[in-house]
Amino acid sequence: MEARQLHNWDIRLRLPNIAVFLIGIALLVFSLYADWAAILKAVGFPVSKLSGQRGQGDLAIVRTLSTIIAVLSMVSPVILWIYPDAITRFSKMVEGFISTAAQVPGFTAVSLAVLVLMKTVLQLSLYLMGYKAYAGDDFARA
């Protein structure tokens, strides 16, 4: 009985998976071959800001991020096609973790402390990367 329900889900998700895969292909082609400077100029962005090294670096970041999103949107339907019960297994693992964590008395306090520590480390590392990128010259950019 369970295999039949899984087959029904597979049939119902086939068309959205194909659509997501095709959208991923279109986004990949767009992200690799689009003229980002012309697109930004069309929406009113001052193109003179893109001629420098930092502007070109920003364009490279936009192109890289859109390529990563395109590849992920192409890979995810394939993974769901190969492993159709992956979401069910993942949700069961998360439910098991949550039920186990609920039994530990200090779990909430420790998890919040870890979250604040991770946020602080991320914030400090981003600050230091920006400090290095601008050579410590925060006020000359204004």
Image (cartoon, rainbow, N blue to C red):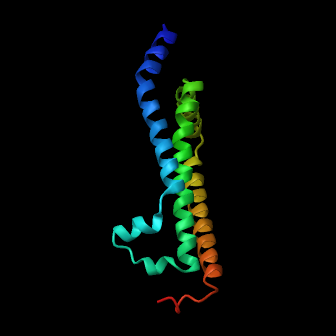
Give coordinates of residue 15: x percent, y percent.
41, 27
Q: Residue at x 49, y 36 (%)?
A: 21
Front position in the image: 48 or 19:
48
Residue displayed at 57% across by 28% down: 86
- Name the outermost residue toward the bottom: 140
Residue 113 location in percent, x, y? Answer: 58, 59
Q: Identify which residue, 88 or 64, lies in the foreground.
A: 64
Q: Is residue 88 above or below residue 103?
A: above
Q: Point out the residue furthest to the top here.
A: 1
Q: Is residue 134 above or below residue 93?
A: below
* In the displayed structure image, the side of residue 24 where residue 100 appears, left or right: right
Q: Can the viewer see residue 58 in this picture?
A: yes
- Place residue 135 in its image quadrant: bottom right
Relative to 134, residue 25 above or below? above
Q: Position of residue 56 (x, y in %)?
A: 55, 73
Q: What residue is shown at x 58% (from left), y 44% (from top)?
A: 105
Which residue sits at x=54%, y=54%?
32
Q: Is residue 2 above or below residue 140?
A: above
